[in-house]
Image (spheres, rainbow, N blue to C red):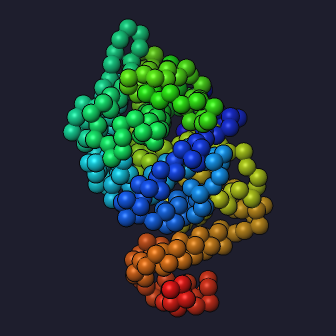
């Protein structure tokens, strides 16, 4: 886990979004043939998350986890916001090119150029003016699936700025920080409704013609260590950014809430206890101790989470062999045996009851 930096704010509240602001994801999922329940469960989140009341809030990191599952299950890394789908694995191009960088100057150029190649236009630009360096996104002609000025499009691009900043931050070794000066957004929304941008403690210029991250010019001189980046090491950049956000501002939670964090890691495909502990930035002994405080051993948390995912997948008509593979079982028979232990009936019988 990277050492704490000045721009890591461990005593701050986590960055939050209003559930109402991301509720358009339901319509996007429906239009794309995706079902919310398995997406949310695989993200380690409540199945009714997007149905909560208008004032409910969701962690910014959890928004990125939803995006990760939409990308994986919908085979589109744009999460169906773009009319031009991006096949899953597209971000691997960015990851592979970043591994050869030695300075933040090179990193910023690689990120901008890579996404321009991916999207087929110069939407991303690095601007050097006076004592500042700006990562700018001009989305004037981007082929959105929604209206250019739709509130969800504005939110998506603001979250894209966060995605870029956290990706850059993950490459900085040791105690160094990134000298972020200013955030620009086309949005004009009341900042009191969310804290996803205020979280960074820098001025926000609203109503700008572009989206941008403005840094002090010294950012060019910062060395990077791609091999130690938790974001580049993650299965997807979405998931890596989500984990990094939780490390920047760990949630203030009761001892029992460690179960929720472990469930998220299991839902993301990490089923080994040591792997989950590493993803949470703690030792296996610490994880065991904290789960003991919550009254649930790791094997029970894992079984409960896998069972929840399995039941949702069966209810949605997925083939048993596919579910077994998704959950890491060697074959359908191994999965069926475990399912019988969890529920007292076979997967086929469960499906018949559900029907």
Q: Could you tell me residue 321's position as x and y percent? A: 40, 81
Looking at the picture, tell me which residue is in the foreground, 197 or 298: 197
In the rendered image of this protein, does residue 138 appear above or below residue 144?
A: above
In the rendered image of this protein, does residue 195 appear above or below residue 250?
A: above
> Splitting the image into 4 quarters, where does residue 14 fall?
top right
Q: Could you tell me residue 291's position as x and y percent? A: 72, 62
> Splitting the image into 4 quarters, where does residue 96 fall?
top left
Is residue 319 among the parts visible in the rendering?
A: yes
Quarter of the image containing the N terminus? top right
Q: Judge left or right: residue 175 versus residue 225.
A: right
Is residue 347 among the parts visible in the rendering?
A: no
Looking at the picture, tell me which residue is in the foreground, 273 or 119: 119
Q: Could you tell me residue 314's position as x and y percent? A: 48, 79
Question: Residue at 32% across / 42% down in the picture?
Answer: 144
Q: Judge left or right: residue 190 versus residue 218.
A: right
Q: Judge left or right: residue 192 versus residue 158.
A: right
Question: Residue at 28% across / 41% down in the picture?
Answer: 143
In the rendered image of this protein, does residue 119 appear above or below residue 47?
A: above
Which residue sits furthest top? 130
Question: Residue at 55% across / 89% down in the picture?
Answer: 353
Question: Residue at 65% across / 52% down in the picture?
Answer: 53
> Splitting the image into 4 quarters, where does residue 30 fall?
bottom left
Q: Could you tell me residue 105's position as x and y percent? A: 35, 24
């Amino acid at each position: 886990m990277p050492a704490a930096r000045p721009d890591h704010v461990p005593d701050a509240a986590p960055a939050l979004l209003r559930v109402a602001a991301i509720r358009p994801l339901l319509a996007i999922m429906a239009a794309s043939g995706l079902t919310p329940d398995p997406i949310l469960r695989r993200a380690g989140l409540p199945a009714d998350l997007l149905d909560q009341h208008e004032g409910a809030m969701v962690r910014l990191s959890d928004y990125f986890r939803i995006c990760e599952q939409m990308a994986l299950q919908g085979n589109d890394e744009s999460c169906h916001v773009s009319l031009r789908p991006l096949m899953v694995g597209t971000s691997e191009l960015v990851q592979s090119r970043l591994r050869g960088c030695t300075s933040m100057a090179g990193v910023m150029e690689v990120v901008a150029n890579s996404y321009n190649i991916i999207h087929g236009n110069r939407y991303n630009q690095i601007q050097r003016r006076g004592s500042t360096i700006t990562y700018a996104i001009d989305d004037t002609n981007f082929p959105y699936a929604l209206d250019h000025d739709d509130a969800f499009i504005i939110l998506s691009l603001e979250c894209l700025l966060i995605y870029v900043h956290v990706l850059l931050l993950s490459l900085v070794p040791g105690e160094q920080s990134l000298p972020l000066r200013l955030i620009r957004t086309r949005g004009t929304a009341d900042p009191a409704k969310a804290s996803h941008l205020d979280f960074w403690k820098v001025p926000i210029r609203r109503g700008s013609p572009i989206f941008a991250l403005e840094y002090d010019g010294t950012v060019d001189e910062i060395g990077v260590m791609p091999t130690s980046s938790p974001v580049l090491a993650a299965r997807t950049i979405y998931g890596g950014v989500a984990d990094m956000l939780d490390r920047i501002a760990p949630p203030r939670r009761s001892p029992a809430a460690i179960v929720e964090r472990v469930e998220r890691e299991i839902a993301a495909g990490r089923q080994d206890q040591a792997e989950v502990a590493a993803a949470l930035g703690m030792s296996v002994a610490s994880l065991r101790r904290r789960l003991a405080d919550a009254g649930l051993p790791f094997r029970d948390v894992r079984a409960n989470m896998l069972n929840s995912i399995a039941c949702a997948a069966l209810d949605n008509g997925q083939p048993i062999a596919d579910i077994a593979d998704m959950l890491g079982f060697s074959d359908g028979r191994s999965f069926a045996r475990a399912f019988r232990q969890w529920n007292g009936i076979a997967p086929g019988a469960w499906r018949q009851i559900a029907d």
